[in-house]
Every structure is written in C-alpha cells, then in structure tokens.
Image (cartoon, grey):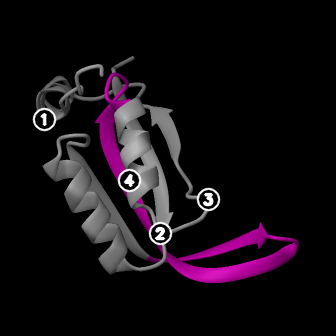
Amino acid sequence: MTDILLVFSTFPDLNQARQTGTMLVDSQLAACVNLCPNIESIYRWKGAVETGAEVLAIFKTTVQAYPAFEKRLTELHPYEVPEIIALPAEKASEAYARWVMEEVKTPAAS
C-alpha cells in the first residue's frame, strides 16, 4: 500500500477540467491530473434521470494532502454537488510513488 490516492471527479467541459487541474497541480495539491474527455454520464438528479457529456479528471495526490485537496477542489468545482471519489493506490512503481510524494506538498496546519 502506498500513500498515493487516485481522485476521480467529473466536469461539464474540458476547459473547466483543465483550469481546475492546472490550479491543483500548480498549488502542489496534486502531482498530476489526467483528463478523459467525451464520456457520457447517466445519473439521477433532483428526481429525474439525466444524461450528459462530461470530462473525467483523475488526480494523483497523497493521503496527507487530501483534506486540503478536497477542500480546494470543492471550492473550484462548478457543480453544486461535485463527484469527488478517492481510492488508494494499492501498488505503484517505486519511482512513480516517490515522484508523486515529492511533487505534492502537505499544507501546514492552520
């Protein structure tokens, strides 16, 4: 088990996903984000079944930085109820895990 988390979040378009991802990587709350455009989501919202085109963002962050990451992603996200699902990376190559841990900074407690 590593201290790396994979965080999944969907966005309404590529521009918003790119802007949010860039801000989270620039602030070192995430080491990387992969943007997967052109997904179709089917979901229930306010009693109705909806469908829509979205962009899936897969962020790489750490367990230690996650509270600050989640807070900032929620602030930046355009959705009323953003999808934020974090899964632990069960295994990762040693070099990649080291890189993620070096790139993500744990914010000081306030």
Who's the residue at 36% across and 35% down the image?
Answer: 68
Q: Which amino acid does label 1 sit on?
A: Glu
In this view, the mark in front (3 or 1): 3
Q: Mark 4 points at which residue?
A: 58
The label on residue 103 is 1
In this view, the mark in front (3 or 4): 3
Contact (Cβ within 8 Å) of mark 2 with mark 1 = no
Helix, strand or loop under label 3: loop
Q: Earlier in the sequence, mark 3 or mark 4?
A: 4
Report, in whole angstroms, how far the alpha carbon at label 2 lies from the one at label 4. Answer: 17 Å
Q: How many marks?
A: 4
Q: In which quarter of the image is residue 51?
A: bottom right
Q: Which of marks 2 and 1 is nearer the N terminus?
A: 2
Q: Nearer the viewer, residue 33 or 65?
A: 65
Report, in whole angstroms, how far the alpha carbon at label 4 lies from the one at label 1. Answer: 16 Å
Q: Mark 3 points at which residue?
A: 81
Q: Which amino acid does label 4 sit on?
A: Ile
The label on residue 78 is 2
- The span shown in magenta is 38-66
Is 43 magenta? The answer is yes
Q: Which of 67 and 5 is in front in this view?
A: 67
